[in-house]
Amino acid sequence: MHSDLQQHHNGVAGLVVSTPIWRVASNHRIGVNAGVDAPNNLAALREEKGWSRPKLAELMNTSPQQVERLEKGQRKLTQDWMIRAGEALGVDPSDIMGGTSARVKSDAQTFRYEGSSADRPHEDLPIYGTVLGAPKFFEGEAIEQTTLNSGDVVGYLKRPPLLNGRGDVYGLYVVSNSMWPVYPEGSTIVAEGKRPARIGDDVVAYLRPENEEDDGERARAVIVKRLVRRTAEYYEFEQFNPAITFRLPRSMVLRIDRVLTFADLLS
């Protein structure tokens, strides 16, 4: 596996992929509207566990209304939604679609010889579509934004075995040079939503939309920066090119995902 490993000036090693370390599978390209809006097994799998919609919604990081629309086929069940639901329910994403009855995983485990194909990377780590958005002014500074659409999977990376079963992990292309030289334009980064970001981590910060519901398909503004401070009132971020630090009120930030480092993949 080849990757460009660059050392951050504060000693944090970042995973940078100028030429993606995992080959993008061209035969898996799907568009913004790709997904399943036919009847599915989501409600049956939820009821099998005795869960309410609010319970499943909490585990999927969405609203009970959104879960209801997904169950009834009123909202398209995209690849992203299937992965999130599968992780929450403890089933394979493919169990959520197809057929009329739910297939719940048993406790049985397949015996695997050392070096078996089950440990080989699978090309199923989604890369979300990104484009350069209009700059946004914070404290008088123009900060470049990226428009990210989690409903638009533009390709897949080979998933390291360490990340198997992780529906919160995704890739995206860096579309500006604001974090150069750590993340040059065109490089690929991999982020996770499960573990909280620490001070000094590079992050993907999702900016809260105005009067919009997070339906998993709508494009939204994000910034790829370094988290340098966190208080009860604001987050402080660092940008490398040009070199500036700026603060955002917590009310403006919907969520913050960590950018995985090479050390994360080896731990």
Image (cartoon, rainbow, N blue to C red):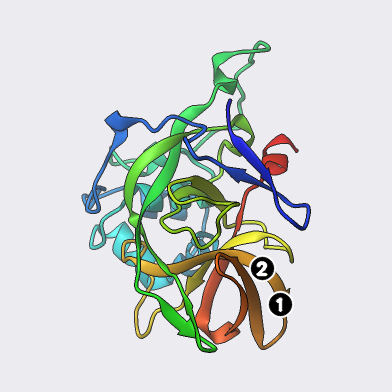
Find residue 226 and report its horizontal and vertical position in percent. Answer: 64, 64
Could you tell me how far apart the alpha carbons at marks 1 and 2 are, in whole angstroms? 8 Å
Find residue 62 and report its horizontal and vertical position in percent. Answer: 45, 67
Residue under numbered circle 2: 227
Q: Is residue 120 above or below residue 169?
A: above
- Asked if residue 122 lies left or right of residue 82, the reply is right
Tell me the crowding category of disc 1: few under 14, some 14 to 19, or many 20 or more residues within 10 angstroms, Cα based: some
- Asked if residue 110 lies left or right of residue 71, the reply is right
Residue furthest front in the image: 242
Query: Does residue 188 appear in this view?
Result: yes
- Foreground pick, 133 / 210: 133
Residue drawn 43% across and 69% down? 145
Three-letter code for the amino acid on which mark 2 is drawn: Leu
- Asked if residue 34 lies left or right of residue 84, the reply is left
- Foreground pick, 165 / 49: 165
Residue drawn 64% across and 13% down? 115
Find residue 35 and report its horizontal and vertical position in percent. Answer: 26, 48
Query: Does residue 103 appear in this view?
Result: no
Residue drawn 72% across and 75% down? 229
Kindly state the secondary structure of the residue where label 2 is placed.
Answer: strand
Residue drawn 74% across and 52% down? 12
Residue under numbered circle 1: 230
Three-letter code for the amino acid on which mark 1 is drawn: Arg
Foreground label between 1 and 2: 2
Quadrant containing the N terminus in the rendered view: top right
- Tell me the quarter of the picture where residue 258 sits: bottom right
- Tell me the quarter of the picture where residue 241 sits: bottom right
Q: Does the residue at mark 1 contact the one at mark 2 (Cβ under 8 Å)?
A: yes
